[in-house]
Image: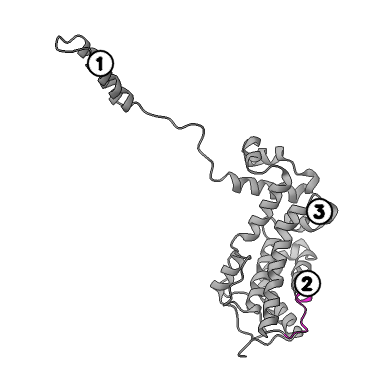
Amino acid sequence: MSEAPATASAAESTEGSPTAGPESTPEVVQAAETTAPTRGRGRPRDPQLEERAHRATLEIFGEKGWNGLTMDEVAARARVGKSSLYLRWPDKATLLAAALRAIQLEDVPLTTDGPTGTSGDAGPDHDAAAAAADQPESAPAELSLRDYLVAHARRRGELYLGEHGLAMLRLYAEARAHEEIFAEVREEAISRFVREERRRVEAAVRDGDLPPTASPMRILDAVEGAIFMHILVTPPELVARVRRGLDAYIGDMVDDQLRAAGFSPRGS
């Protein structure tokens, strides 16, 4: 900045001036201090650090599993300091839980046609379905049970077929192999989502959309299991075809399960 040098020159010229008194020097020094530039301390916080750390964690976990996941490799692959990781996540279990939860909360856009299936039933309100997928902790009341389950199954399918699908598939096996270590991961990445889905089906029973004999557990097992197996057993050369037909498959599959459970929406 130019103010400080200019003020310094003024101080020098004033010292030799016959009109300058000793009391003028502190004023000049104070002016110089006021105009001196200030510097912030430390490096600015990296807004993308969390995203890079999550991505690296899921990539490594998908490739190498729990035993191959290390904070050292996450730091190297995410191009961040290891100390920065530990400031946010105390250990790799906490980091993995955060990464798995984050990708399940991300918005997965529905296709223009939406997952309506071919059975002739009314399709979902696409905006509401996307909102429900983005906020799994509180299913919107305006979304029907059928549309909620379709949106949920669509999200699951996209996760399994997506960039971090292998990490999602590994999660279930590793959670069984390392039950104590994966307690937090299971809670953050599995249990909390399952509880919310079960509450949504239970609400449909209370509201009369499903008969009292309907089992939320069996309905969700059928929907979750169907989409899981549909993708898991697909050979690599057929993945593209499965992806193209995913919307119709999900719509028909959900309709089949709800029809078997006696689904009868109010007002229908």
Marks 1 and 3: CB-CB under 8 Å? no
Please identify the quarter of the rendering in which residue 36 is found: top left
For badge 1, the amino acid type reads Thr
The verdict on residue 155 being magenta is no
The label shown at residue 221 is 2
* 38 lies left or right of 183: left
Residue mark closest to the camera, 2 vs 1? 1
Q: What are the residue bounds of the magenta stretch?
A: 211-219
Q: Which residue is mark 1?
A: 25
Mark 1, Cα crowd under 10 Å, few <14 / some 14-19 / many 20+, is some
The label shown at residue 174 is 3
Residue 183 position, x and y percent, is: 78, 53
Per the model, the C-alpha gap separating discs 2 and 1 is: 83 Å
In the rendered image, the quadrant that contains the C terminus is bottom right
Is 87 placed above or below 131 here?
Answer: above
Q: Give the residue furthest to the bottom.
A: 268
Mark 2, Cα crowd under 10 Å, few <14 / some 14-19 / many 20+, is few
Residue mark closest to the camera, 1 vs 3? 1
For badge 2, the amino acid type reads Asp
Element marked by disc 3: helix
- Residue drawn at (69%, 70%), measured in percent from left and top? 197
Residue 146 position, x and y percent, is: 66, 79
Residue 91 position, x and y percent, is: 72, 43
Per the model, the C-alpha gap separating discs 3 and 2 is: 20 Å
Element marked by disc 2: helix
